Image (cartoon, rainbow, N blue to C red):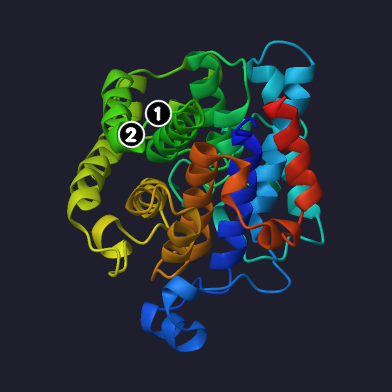
């Protein structure tokens, strides 16, 4: 039976999102008092998701559209991405506590002739940049350059801060490595090497003149600022994965996840604490003081990419919202 990494990652992302949606904005003591011990957290009967899953599907559909039209390239991806983001913005279903950066940027992206770089919020590195990037790590047949460029572009349409770009690139790379069977024990080392390799690489083909909207003296300084923040948190993550007790809130080690690099690190930490117990990893991620749904959706994407579709309880997978859309994209890329 093939592993079905794409289906596993997309289902895991949505399940983490649905598990963390009711606990977001709550302290750990409040979560425990409302829902009981964290190891027994249950998916609600109506497994509703947040904007995290909605926007992941938007990225996934845009990517599928772009790849149907030929080899993945910036213009070919930008157009369907923009359309999907604006459709999401205008949808009556966009009522799941979306982030202000996404709302502001999508309002600006509506204007036909406006360059996307003029809609991008270059001061924002919210986790909205990378909680939706998993599809780019899952789509088969992309070169490393296409994967990195697409991951950064989808972030930059809304979140133009260099740390948002670097964290999105790292998140997609982590999903890709896990889907291909990279041992979780060595994953953070791989990500640190990747960050160091790309530290001053600004991809003009994919990002255009985005960097000129910042105060940085040049494109290399602009992008290095993002990779340096990611390298700092990857160092903290490496230490935490060795030393943190699974019984303490992971946010204490790697941050609350409201910003891109913290969402990556804390989502990964929850996965690395329980690499072969995906449901326990999701429960740990959902019982956190920070942005619980985004942390748990990233944890679910990592665990599902590593373990495949069989990682998730059938009764959970059967009642997740948008199940048909998630399975259709997963089947497309697992084929």
Q: Earlier in the sequence, mark 1 or mark 2?
A: 1
Q: Nearer the viewer, residue 242 or 222?
A: 242
Can I make out residue 207 in this image?
A: no
Q: Residue at x 66, y 47 (%)?
A: 55
Q: Nearer the viewer, mark 1 or mark 2?
A: 1
Relative to 265, residue 249 above or below = below
Q: Residue at x 31, y 68 (%)?
A: 249
Estimate the x, y position of residue 77 in percent, counting from the top left.
68, 24
Q: Is residue 73 left or right of residue 192?
A: right
Q: Nearer the viewer, residue 122 or 38?
A: 38
Q: Nearer the viewer, residue 42 or 260?
A: 42
Residue labelled with disc 2? 187
Marks 1 & 2, CB-CB < 8 Å contact:
yes
Residue labelled with disc 1? 182
Under tag 2, what secondary structure?
A: helix
Can I make out residue 164 in this image?
A: yes
**How packed is label 2: few (under 14 Cα within 10 Å), some, or many (20 or more)?**
some
């Amino acid at each position: 039976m093939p592993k079905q990494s794409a289906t596993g990652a997309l289902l895991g992302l949505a399940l983490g999102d649905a598990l963390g949606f009711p606990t977001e904005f709550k302290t750990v003591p409040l979560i425990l008092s409302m829902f009981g011990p964290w190891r027994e957290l249950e998916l609600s009967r109506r497994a509703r998701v947040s904007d995290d899953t909605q926007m992941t599907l938007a990225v996934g559909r845009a990517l599928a559209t772009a790849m149907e039209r030929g080899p993945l390239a910036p213009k070919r991806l930008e157009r369907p991405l923009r359309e999907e983001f604006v459709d999401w913005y205008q949808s009556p279903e966009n009522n799941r506590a979306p982030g202000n950066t996404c709302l502001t940027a999508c309002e600006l992206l509506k204007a036909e002739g406006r360059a996307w770089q003029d809609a991008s919020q270059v001061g924002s590195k919210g986790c909205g940049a990378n909680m939706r990037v998993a599809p780019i790590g899952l789509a088969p047949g992309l070169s490393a350059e296409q994967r990195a460029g697409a991951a950064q572009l989808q972030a930059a349409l809304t979140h133009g801060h260099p740390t948002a770009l670097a964290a999105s690139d790292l998140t997609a790379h982590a999903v890709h490595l896990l889907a291909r069977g990279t041992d979780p024990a060595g994953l953070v080392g791989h990500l640190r090497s990747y960050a160091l390799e790309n530290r001053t690489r600004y991809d003009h083909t994919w990002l255009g003149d985005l960097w000129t909207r910042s105060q940085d003296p040049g494109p290399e300084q602009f992008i290095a600022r993002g990779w340096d923040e990611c390298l700092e948190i990857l160092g903290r993550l490496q230490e935490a994965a060795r030393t943190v007790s699974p019984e303490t809130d992971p946010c204490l080690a790697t941050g609350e996840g409201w910003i891109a690099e913290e969402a990556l690190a804390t989502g990964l930490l929850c996965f690395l604490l329980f690499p072969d117990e995906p449901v326990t990893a999701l429960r740990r991620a959902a019982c956190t003081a920070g942005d619980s749904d985004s942390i748990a959706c990233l944890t679910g994407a990592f665990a599902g990419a590593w373990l495949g579709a069989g990682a998730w309880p059938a009764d959970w997978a059967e009642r997740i919202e948008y199940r048909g859309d998630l399975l259709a994209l997963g089947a497309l890329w697992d084929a």
